[in-house]
Amino acid sequence: MTTTSSDGGDDSDSQQTNAAAAAAEAAFLDSYLLFDLLGDRDHRVVNMFSSAVATLETTMKERERQRRTAGAARTRARASSVTSKITACTGGVYVLGNNDAIFKPRCEEAAAAGVGVGDGNGVGDGVIGDANPLRRGFKLGDGAIREVAAYQLDRAAGHFAGVPPTTLISVRSDVIKQDPTAAAGPAVDGEREHLEGSLQKYVANIGSSEDYGSSSFQLQQLQAVALLDIRLFNTDRHGGNMLVAVDDAPHAPHAGARRSNVLVPIDHGLCLPDFQHLGEFEASWLFWREAREELTPASRAHVAALDADRDAATLRGLNVREPAILTMRLMTHFLKFAVLELNWTLHAIGVFLTQSHLTATPPTTPSAPTAAAAQSGENEFASDFQALLVKAAAGAADASLVGFLSGDEAVAFSEERARNLLEAAQSVWQRELLTRQFD
Ligand SMILES: Nc1ncnc2c1ncn2[C@@H]1O[C@H](COP(=O)(O)OP(=O)(O)OP(=O)(O)O)[C@@H](O)[C@H]1O
Ligand SMILES: [Mg+2]
């Protein structure tokens, strides 16, 4: 069709075409399959998101076609091959399409914790938002946003650790589960129900770090992942959560050689616990010989460039809760101190975060740390890091910090308390660690 308008028929045509395409796309995204809850404009996320949408579009068209041409039973059987559930993992993890993206629905975090599944939208299940019974400092259903948070903070640091593009989405339930009576998959009725969760780009891999010796990874990549873990206080960096991909790019020095293995950090749903629960850091790299090596100039520059205020703003934009944001602030400041002032290795930092050698040290105020530890449900400090944090709270001018750190519900979260705790921690680190030899 052409128009004869004086201001340019071609322009008008293309505007109409664009508008029609946009409307079709909006209708498609809004009512049909999938929409991006965060509206992330990062091109990596957009590309990943588009490919997942394209995959799902094909999937749904195929299902429609099958519905029309085949019996229901046959439709179910064939459609179930389009999304598949990974069974060898704790939560609900689905591969979309032909290894295009990984979808982890929020409601299945609850299932992973063994506390039941409702309708996936928080109605009737009563568990999303509850404390995670398996891990202190987390709420059920928060994992998806933490997956996105890890990606966004890594992205803000120039993709230093290489977290795969991740976004928050809502997927129509029948994309994930075709047969409502099947055992696997979220229990959702009705075609129009949507499931929220994280969508992460699928990384083609040759296994996980557990399958390889640590010497097969580049030191720089190993350090980048470890620094991310410290920054986010990762409580779940076991070997299976570092995939091994192969760098087959032309610039790889020896394609196919061991050194071309690429370490890819995944599974960040248990990062950033609330600041009252910094006793369960877990990192398998701690036991790798390479963790004792000095940090490279690039790693040091990365740490120096970290900006806790910028990252706090990013996390707030994702609706991460303030107690978890304070964890990031504490860890970023600690990381800077440990690396730039103490010159600690990753091993020294890891030991400090996971082992307790300071419990015999008399606290400044004898009763307060013990009370704080008791209130937080911990009989003794899990680590020297935690011991010094409690000591900082006990010795601070702001007397409310003891209750603040122990999770006393009568002591509300406030920006002032957060700042005071951060400052108290920094001065205790200065006092206690500059003169002490660890490792
Ligand atoms: N981005 C990805 N690319 C390729 N495979 C992935 C990706 N994310 C997850 N997987 C695969 O799915 C498995 C489970 O994913 P993930 O570790 O995120 O879930 P989980 O339920 O928290 O696992 P677990 O608690 O057992 O560690 C991984 O071990 C990996 O095999
Ligand atoms: Mg995992």
Image (spheres, rainbow, N blue to C red):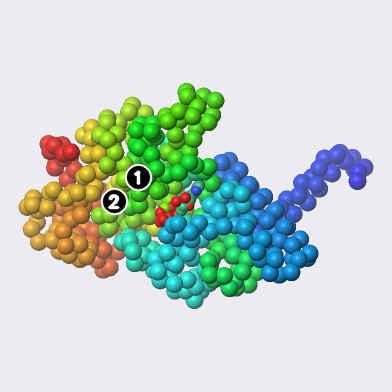
Q: What residue does disc 1 label?
A: 229
Q: Position of 152 compared to 3: left or right?
A: left
Q: Position of 330 compared to 254: left or right?
A: left
Within 10 Å of disc 2 (Cα), the crowding (few <14, some 14-19, many 20+) is: many
Q: Position of 88 compared to 135: left or right?
A: right
> Which comes sooner in the sequence, label 2 or label 1?
1
- Which residue shows up at 88% across the image and 41% down it? 9
Q: Nearer the viewer, residue 406 or 174?
A: 174
**Badges 2 and 1: C-beta atoms under 8 Å apart?**
yes
- Which residue shows up at 35% across the image and 37% down it? 213
From mark 2 to mark 1, how far is it between C-alphas?
9 Å
Residue 366 visible in rendering: yes
Q: Is residue 44 above or below residue 195?
A: above
Q: Nearer the viewer, residue 421 or 157?
A: 157
Q: Is residue 336 above or below residue 126?
A: above
Give the residue type at disc 1. Answer: Asp
- Which residue shows up at 47% across the image and 64% down it? 108
- Which residue shows up at 81% across the image and 42% down it? 14
Give the residue type at disc 2. Answer: Phe
Tag 2's secondary structure? loop
Tag 1's secondary structure? helix
> Where does residue 417 sit, x and y in percent of width and height?
27, 55
Circle number at residue 187:
none
Quarter holding residue 319: bottom left
Quarter holding residue 170: bottom right
Q: What residue does disc 2 label?
A: 281
> Where does residue 313 sit, x and y in percent of width and height?
42, 48
